[in-house]
Amino acid sequence: MVNALNIKVSEFKTGLLSFIIFALCFILYGNTIPNHYSLDDELVSYNNKRIAGGIKAIPAIWSTFYSEGKLKYEYRPVVKTTFAIEYQFFGQNPHVSHLINILLYALTALLLFKILRKLFASYSTLLAFTAIILFVAHPVHTEVVASLKNRDELLSFLGCIISLWFLLKYADSSKLEYLLFAFISYILAYFSKSSAIVFVAVFPLVLYFYGKTSIKKIMLAFVIILIAMIAARFIPKALLPAPNRDVFFFENPLFFYPSLVYKIPMGILSLLFYIKILIYPHPLVFYYGYNMIPMVSLYNPVVIVTAIMLLILFIYSLFGIKKRHVLSFSILYFFVTISLFSNIFKPAMGIVAERYVYASSLGFCLAIAFLLLKLLKIETIQNNILKKDWIKILIPLFIILIPFSAKTVSRNPNWNTHMSLYLNDIKYLNKSGKSNALIASQMMQDVNTTLNSGIVPNNLKEKADSIILFYNNSIKVLPSYYSSYNNIGTIYITMLAPFENDSSKQREIYSKAIWYFKESIKFKPLYFDALYNLGFTYEKLGNYKQSVKYYNKAAVLDSSYIKSWSNMANIYNDYLNNMDSAIILNQTIMKIAPASDIPYVNIGTYYLMRSDSVNAMKSFETASIKVPSNKVIAELLYYYFKDKDKVKAEKYRVLANIPVVTFLNK
């Protein structure tokens, strides 16, 4: 009876601790539920046509890339599947998505609590509980939980620790079905994000420290997971087309300077960044990239001191391996899991990121928990939690939790929208070229949305100047930032010049734009956007030969964009008095875009300008066949045929949606 009572009391305490962990997840992240969509969420949520297909889209999701826009890359079908299922039942609802992120985070924390209790069963439950409380509250996780796009991190880590749980069950029982479950869980983790690859090394490490596993079992588990990794990594590559993912200098200079001379110091500084942000998580920002972590030499004092510190930690961890010491495990786990994002083995997008340290932070939190217990002289080798131990741990734990929690709760609303995030973080990002370009791009998009709706903001010039300022900041960080030059030029020709009443000032604005477009192609000669914009701007200035020159370059670079051909053709007809060349160019459009009505409308207009109504109407009729919804052409054809052919006139009246009363009156 006494033993049974002790078990029940122990289970009650464990259940209470689990409830505290679960509740803390919602206390800290509940204020993300009112948030909307933010940075990169469009990849997996709003405006994603694939996900809008709901459950029916799942087969297509599993046979396509994660990103399916201009850039096609990565294979993360599990993530998109969760959003497709959400869409099926809740529609486009960011608040439900944020709630699910919190639930995934809470589930991860509960499972980690269970695993740490099992892995360190000879230690006080306070060790696992303190570690997980620190893990849950750590502000560095706000990017993962508050950002919907980063559900890939949540699902990948959760899948890995589920796999780990099954491997521990296999170690206890030798039942092969647990290896099968671990195999499946790991593949799903990898199909959430390929960063799961590091757990191929983590699993044997954990099984060794578990202490109940023979070398034979560890090797078998390692082989099974290795097979799962190879299958998850290479089968999609064999079935999908080659990815299309350009890399840029501002994302990571190591893509362009892959030598170890640059990799090693960058890697050491990256590891220093991760340790710093775990100890002192401020400031937290949405993007780092060039030049937030500078490129320095191997002989840089900070690099040398950090390298010595890291080496000492690593050597210390090796001395404790045989005894299976908690600190040895914590350090080795941290180094293994962060290795993928250290920039030593391969460049990491953005150089560093808070999300990259998500899984690794567990090692840090476990080490801090162990050191706290040791510092407070709380007996770690015991199963029960004594009342005096609770009293000892609560004060220092709260000293850490209060600032961590305050930072987490205050950070979450920053992820409400793109602009709320950008405007909050930009003050810390003067050295990040990409971040300045991102905020400028979002501001530019917002202004364009307003203009496209037919509304001209009263403060348009002030808004344009602000956007230009941020783009110029990005150029200061990276003088070769060709897209920023192009975008500044675009602001001149779309937001400033069209609304300038003084013609001489308008020409001056167009001339400024040309300088920026030329700077853009100086750094990237085959840049379609800048080439097309040069053609457009020269056309506005009346320099038609230069306009045709750049339109032609743009058309050769991307023949599918028919506006280049069309604008060039219209210049030949309207200004260079060369209708034959104009018609040839429109015939090119007919081949490129057979369903388009543009070339037929163009040719019809050319004939109409020459008072050749018969040939003009022939072209317009073909245009109407191609695109019957073109009401302007349909109305023009109706008025032409109303006194010549009543059948055709009626046909085009219907297409033009001209009321019968108007028709009869005419």
Image: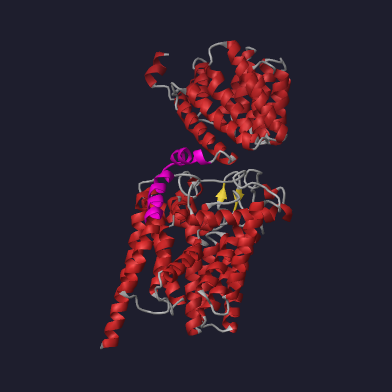
Q: Nearer the viewer, residue 267 or 45?
A: 267
In reply to whether residue 427 is colored magenta, the answer given is yes
State how the image is colored. Answer: secondary structure
Residue interval drawn in magenta: 402-428
* Image mark count: 0
The x, y position of residue 120, in whole percent, is 46, 76
Q: Residue at x 50, y 14 (%)?
A: 643
The structure residue drawn at horizontal position 43% and vertical position 45%, both measured from the top left corner, is 415
Please state which of residues 390 and 243 is positioned toward the viewer in this rendering.
390
Q: Nearer the viewer, residue 603 or 218?
A: 218
Residue 347 percent coordinates (x, y): 65, 53
Give the residue displayed 43% in from the left and 42% down from the top.
417
- Looking at the picture, does residue 63 appear above or below residue 180? above
Name the image quarter holding residue 216. bottom right
Principal secondary structure, stretch drawn in magenta: helix
Q: Position of residue 202 (x, y in %)?
A: 56, 70
Check if residue 432 falls in the magenta segment.
no
Let me know if residue 110 appears in the view.
yes
Q: Quadrant of the N terminus?
A: bottom left
| Place of residue 162 in the rendered image (x, y in percent of width and height, measured from the top left) | 47, 69
233 to the left or right of 383: right
Closer to us: 13 or 301: 301
Q: Is residue 85 left or right of residue 286?
A: left
Q: Quadrant of the C terminus?
A: top left
Quadrant in which residue 413 is drawn: top left
